[in-house]
Amino acid sequence: MDRNENNNPPGIFTRLKQHHIYRVAAWYGASIAVLIQIVARAFPYFGWSAAVPAIIIILIAGFPVALALSWLLVKPAALDNQTTWQRRHWKLGAVVVPLIISAVVVSGIFAFRFSEQRVAAEQTAAQTEAKPAAPIFNPPSASIVVLPFTNLSGDPEQAYFSNGITEELTDALGQNTGLTVIAWGTASRYSTGKQSPAEIGKALNVAHIVDGSIQRDGDQVRVSVELVSTVTGRQLWSEHYDDSFKNIFAVQDKITVAVADALKVKFAAMQGAPTQNPEAHQLYLKGLAAMDRFTAADMQAAEDYFQQAVKLDPSYADAWAGLAETYVKLSEISTLPLKEVLPKIRSAAQKALALDPHNVNALVALGNADVNDNRIAEAKAELKQALALDPSNAAAHDVYSDVLPIQQALAQSQEAARLDPDSAEVQVSLASYYQDLSNWPQMVAASLALNRLSPHGIDAAFYLAFAYAEMQRGEDAVKAFDLAQPSTALDRKLIEAGRLTYQTRLEPTLRPKALAALASLSHAKLSPFSQSGLIQLYLALGEKETAMSMLPGLCAAAPIACNDLAINPEFITPLHDDPHFEKLAKQYTTITRDPAPASTSPH
C-alpha cells in the first residue's frame, strides 16, 4: 500500500520517484545534450543555420513538458486505490499538461520566426556594410550645360536656328572664366524631357542646366529660358524675351548676364553684336548646323554657308572663324591636301582675329594650323591665349595637347573629355596618348568610346586591334574590325584588309591573301589616318621595309600624324634601329616623354 501508517499520502520525493520523474529528467537531459550537438553541427551544413537557435530553445523548453507528461502518464497504482486528493491532482494535471505543451509549441514557433528575422537582419546589415555606399552627387558649383533649346516654330527645318542660337549662347557663357561649361558637341546630344535634370547632371557632372525654347514668327523671336539645379531639381531663374531677330545678340547677352548673376560669377559681356546683317547671321547658323554633322559633304556645305555670310558682311569675325574651322575639319576627314588647306586656314583665321582679337574659335583654328605645320612655338602661344579667354573650350585643350610632353598632353585631353565627353576627336587623342604610354586597357576603353560615338568611322577598329594584339588577345584583335560600320567602299576594303591581317597572325597560311589586300590599297587616295592604318597593317605582318617606304609621305602630308614617332610603340618597336626612321622621328616628333625631374646634388 502506498500510504503510511497514519493513512497519509506519501511525501513529494516519494511521489516523484513513483512517477519516474528522476529517471525521465536524467534521460531527457542526456538526450537533448546529444541532440543540441548534432543540430549545431549538422544544420549549417544543409544551410539551415537560421533554425538552430529555435531548435535549441524548443528542446530546452521541452524539459518541463517531459516531466509533466511523466507525472500524468506514469501511474503509481490503480486509480481505484488513490485517494480523493490524488484523483483531483491527476485531473488537474490532465488539464495543465496540454496547456504547457501548447505554450511550448507556440513559443517555439515564435522563437523560430524571431531567429529567422534576426539572421535576415544580420545578413542585410552585413551586405549593407560590404556594399560601398552610393557616391554623393556633388558637382562643381559653377558648372553648367546649355541644352538644345526646343524649336517651337512647328517647322523641323528651323531646328538649325534654335540649335545655332543655343550654340552661340554656350560659347558666350564659356567666356565667363568662373564657369565650367560643357561643350556644345556633347550638350547637343541631350534634349529637354528625355532625362531628368538629376540624370543629366550626374552624366555630365554639372550643377546647373540652362534650357528653354525658341519660337520664330517672321522677324519676331520669343526666347524662353530657365536655369535649373541638377542637385535639387529646383528652378533657380526663368525669363522670356520678345524681340526682333536682328536684336537676338542683345537677347543672348541678357541671358548670359542673368545666368552669371544667378550663379554669382563674373560676367563676360559681348564686344558688341558680331554682325548687323540678319541674313549673314542666318547663313552662319546654317553653317554651324552643317559642321555639327561632321561629314566631308557637310563640311563643304558649311564652307559654302560661311563664304556667303562673309560676302554679305565682310566684317563678320565669327563667320571668318567658322570658315577657318571648316578647312581644319576638311584636312582631317577628306583627301584635301594639307598644303592646300593650311594657307586657307591661316587666311580666314587671321581675318577673324583682325576684326576681333579675342575670337577664341579663330585662335584655335590658327593654333591647329600651326600644329599641323610643325610651328610649335606659335601654336603654343595661340592656344594659351584661347584658353585664357575661354577655359571651357574643349577643342583648345585638345589641340594644345599636341604640343606638350606626353603626361601633360594626356591631362589636357582628359580635361577636353571632361568638357566634351561625346567628342569623337577627343577620344581619338586619348586613344593615341594611351598607346604612347602603353596603357592598353585605357586605350581599349577610349577606342570603344570612339566606336560608340563614330560607328561609321574606321579609326576605332585600328586602335582596338593594336591594343588587343599587345595584350596577347589575338582573337579580340580580329573581332575589333567587326565593330566598324564603314560607309564608303574604300573604308570597307581597309576594314577587310585589317581583319585579314590580324587573322594572319593567328593563321599564317592567310598571309598571301592579306598582302594582296594591302597591295590593292597602296595606290588608293587615302586620308592621313587611312594611310597610317595601312602602315600599321604592314608592320603587323612584319613588312618593315614597305611600311618605312610609306612613312615619309605620310609625315610630309600630315605632320600631326607623326608627332609622336619617337615614343609610339607601334613604330619604335619594329623600326627603332632604322636610321631613316630615327631621322623622321627627330624631324616630326613634338610629343615627347616628360623630362625627368632635375636631381639635386647634396650640399
Image: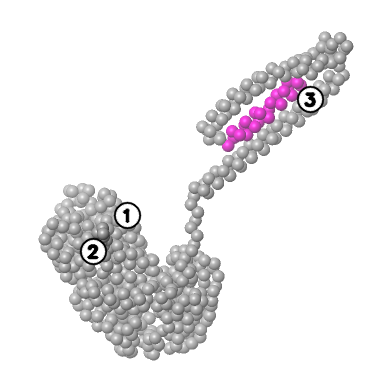
Question: Could you tell which of marks 3 and 2 lies nearer the N-terminus?
Answer: 3
User: Which residue is at the front of the view, 549 or 26?
Assistant: 26
Q: How crowded is mark 2: few (under 14 residues within 10 Å), some or many (20 or more)?
A: some
Observer-side mark, 2 or 1, equals 2
Question: In x, y percent, where is residue 152?
Answer: 48, 78
Observer-side mark, 1 or 3, equals 1
Residue located beneath label 2 in the image? 592
Q: Is mark 2 on a helix, strand or loop?
A: loop
Q: What residue type is labelled 2?
A: Thr
User: Which residue is at the front of the view, 275 or 434?
Assistant: 434
Q: Does residue 68 show up magenta in the picture?
A: yes
On residue 94, the disc is 3
Which residue is drawn at the image coordinates 17% and 48% (left, top)? 509
Q: What element carries label 3?
A: helix
Q: Residues within 10 Å of mark 3 (few under 14, many from 20)?
A: some
Q: Is mark 1 on a helix, strand or loop?
A: helix
Which residue is drawn at the image coordinates 60% and 40% (left, top)? 116
Q: Which amino acid does label 1 sit on?
A: Pro
Which residue is drawn at the image coordinates 76% and 27% (left, top)? 97
Question: In x, y percent, where is residue 37?
Answer: 57, 27
User: Which residue is at the front of the view, 424 or 367?
Assistant: 367
Magenta span: chief secondary structure? helix
What's the CA distance linking mark 2 and mark 1?
21 Å
Q: Quadrant of residue 354?
A: bottom left
What's the CA distance linking mark 3 and mark 2?
98 Å
Q: Which amino acid does label 3 sit on?
A: Ala
Instruction: Classify residue 70 as left or right of residue 539.
Output: right
| Quarter of the picture holding the N terminus | top right
Residue numbers of the magenta segment: 50-72
User: Which residue is at the front of the view, 260 or 315?
Assistant: 260
Residue located beneath label 1 in the image? 441
